[in-house]
Structures are given as structure tokens and as C-alpha cells.
Amino acid sequence: MKYDVIVIGGGSAGLMAGIAASKQGARVLLLDKGDKLGRKLGISGGGRCNVTNNKELDELIRHIPGNGRFLYSSFSNFNNKDIIDFFERLGIRLKEEDNGRMFPVTDKAKTVVDTLVAQVRKQGVEIRLGSPVDTLLYDDGHVVGVRLRTGETLECRSAIVAAGGKSVPQTGSTGDGYAWAEKAGHSITELFPTEVPLTSNEPFISSKELQGLSLRDVSLSVWNPKGKKLIEHRGDMIFTHFGISGPIALRCSQFVVKALKQFGTGNIEVSVDLMPDAGTDEAYTETLKLAEKEPKKSTKNILKSFLPEKMVPLLLQRSGLSESLTFDNIPRQEWMELAKLMKRFPIRVYGTLSIEDAFVTGGGINLKEVDPRTMESKLMGGLYFCGEILDIHGYTGGYNITAAFSTGYTAGLHAGTEA
């Protein structure tokens, strides 16, 4: 049996590719090696499914630091506003939360997954679960079919690879598609973890004295060995038993990975600004005023009302200040050191958790070998790529899923039209 289009992978990009291809009247088969479609989609956004982000296009691209500009063409076909309209037309009401994140009002990812799968079926796409692909078949510079691991061969005019990257492998993303792309002559840029917690062996991390401490509305910066700030993100973070995590730590992770590689060093400094809206002099003055108001109270107890309590002993120790110190005995130079630490509390990090622990895979199919207008391979006719297998990665917050939906739609649109 010959299909017009075979889509490999039933995640965000694959489901959207199936919808777009079948909409062109193509006969479409969707293959997935698992027993369930949309597995990664089902756990996204903390199980609530952050379907896209409502920011303006240029701002959206800025939040996809891994080759986001490549997406301008596919966004002209299907962008974040189109994604919102698409789901609302299917009966899923969406709501906007902080920083433009869009969620279903049900707060359930299952709502999104079930609706997408239902639409795929409604449009006549044939679905085969539990069907792992062994390889793609090429002949005379064109895709001709797909061979399953069972040995079964399926013929097609076009194939869309939406098999994902290597992050969150329990959802089925184990990097299978890279070998199929290489067989077609494609190169794979180096894979690395992004949106992943940072690891550190600082004494206060090893001792677990800050473990579980959450910091709200702080800034986290990454510094290169020459003292240049590479990136800064503001938001929330948390200390763990292995290092630091939370939204801003995840956002900084790709810059840590790249800096470690670029400078060939064993560790990189990241620093926390506990008072991002104040300068060092203001931090000095405000805390000193607090101590002056209650001159008989110990420094430790004064600062507990101003700084995260778990951090106070560490900050005082590093500043050369006694915990029992009172206002009359505060040495001004050491107090300035305390203010400087509030503005730049350093943490040496030596890496990140593994790519399997990451939310997103960095690296992937070299974009120079893919037509951004269609997502078709420039090296093999009828071969399309979409989603995380491409060398595109963004921050968490609806950006990666937007890229997946957009590239999936674009690949499906053009594969379906060609077929």
C-alpha cells in the first residue's frame, strides 16, 4: 500500500504535520513507536500544556536563542496567533498567564492531546501505534518508503520526520531520527542539553545547607572566565542537592554549556542578584538602616526580615561579619562586602544534568541543509523535518512547542501539497 505522506512521530510536530498534510487531501499515515500519541505534550507545562506564547513575533523569536530566526518563514505559514486560533476553533478555550504563556482553561494537557488526536482521526489520517521505524528508504535522490523494525516496508511519496530529540526519553524521544537523516546525507550539529538544571560542588551545595531554598524574583547571570556577562535572566530559582534549578537556571543552562566548551574550563561562575531593582549602594544603605532601627538586635535576626533566612549565615560568613553583631559594632567595609554579595552571590557550576534530564535538546539537523520555507531537505527529495530534531531550541514558556507546531504545520502543508 502506498501513502502520499508518512509522518514518523506522534508528538506536537507530528500531530500538526498529519493535520496539515491531510488537509491538502493527501493520504497520510502517522507512525509512532509508543502505545500513545502526544506523550511529551501530555506532560508539558507541568501537566497543564503551555500550548504557545502570545508575545509579538520578534519577541517570540528572541526567546528562541537557538536559531530562532530560521523560523520566520514557517511562522508566516502558522505562527503563535494561528495556534491560538486553531485550538479555539477546535473548542479549546485558552487563557493567558504570566509572560504571555497560553494554557487551556481546563488546566489539563489531556484536553489538548485528546483534541489534537481526535482531529487527526477526523481528517482521515491512518494511525499505527507500536510501530518503531528501522530506517527510511531512498532511491535516486528521493524518499520512496519506510521500513519498520518488523521488516515491513511501507511505500510513500514523502516522509516527515518528527521523531524528537534526545531529551525526556521516557516519552519516546531517543534520537532515532538522526541516523535516518545522516543516511540521507545530512549532518547533525553537536547535541547538548538545554533547559536543564545546573550542577555545582560548592561547599554550601555539598553540605545541602541551602537545599530546597526557593528565591523569588531574583536575577541569575552567567560570566565567562574573562569576567564578561554572557546572559542574565530574572525570575525564580531553587537550590537543590546537586546545584540549582528553576526557570532562570534552566534558561541560563545553554550558555553555561557553551561557555564551558568554548573556554575549555572545568567550571563557570553564575551569580545571583538578590536585589535586582537596587544598586550596591542602595543595598548597603537599606540594610544598614534596618540595623539602625533596632540597634540591640543581632545582625543575623535583622537580616532575616530582608533576605532569605537560610542564606543569612552564609552571607555574613563570606562578608567577614559575626552573626551576633549589633548596629554599634558594624564595620562599614565588611557591610559593603555584604551589599556586594547581595548583588552578586557567586556559584561555581561545572555543568548540567544529562541531556536525558533536559527539557529540550540543543543541536540537531543542520539548518543549512533544510529549506526554511517548506522544511524539506535540500539533499533528499520528499524528506521533511520538523520539531525538536532540528537544530532549534528555545526557552521554556511555550516557545519550543510553538516552534514544533509551526514547523510541523509547514512540513505537512508542503508535503501534502507536493504529494
Image (cartoon, rainbow, N blue to C red):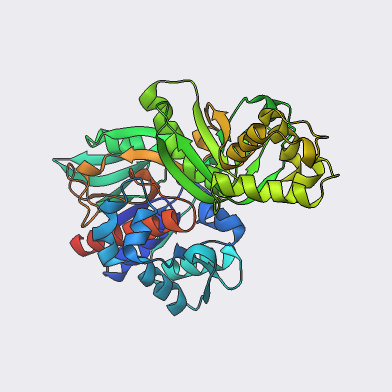
Q: Residue at x 72, y 36 (%)?
A: 210
Q: Residue at x 74, y 50 (%)?
A: 290
In the depicted view, which residue is nearer to us: 231 or 65? 231
Q: Work out whether 396 lies above or below 406.
A: above
In the image, farthest residue toward the right: 296
In the image, farthest residue toward the front: 328
Q: Work out whether 286 lies above or below 17.
A: above
Query: Residue 411: horizontal and vertical position, in percent?
Result: 28, 57
Query: Residue 123: horizontal and vertical position, in percent?
Result: 38, 71
Q: Residue at x 76, y 48 (%)?
A: 292
In the depicted view, which residue is nearer to us: 110 or 35? 110
Residue 18 occupies which quadrant of the picture? bottom left
Q: Work out whether 25 lies above or below 239.
A: below
In the depicted view, which residue is nearer to us: 342 or 171? 342
Q: Work out whether 301 lies above or below 158.
A: above
Q: Is residue 63 left or right of residue 248?
A: left
Q: What quarter of the picture does the N terminus occupy? A: bottom left
Query: Looking at the image, can residue 174 be seen?
Result: no
For the image shown, how many numbered marks are present on the structure?
0
Residue 333 occupies which quadrant of the picture? top right
Query: Residue 225: horizontal and vertical position, in percent?
Result: 42, 26
In the image, farthest residue toward the left: 140
Query: Residue 378: horizontal and vertical position, in percent?
Result: 17, 45
Query: Looking at the image, can residue 189 be seen?
Result: yes
Q: What quarter of the picture does the C terminus occupy? A: bottom left
Q: Is residue 371 left or right of residue 149?
A: left
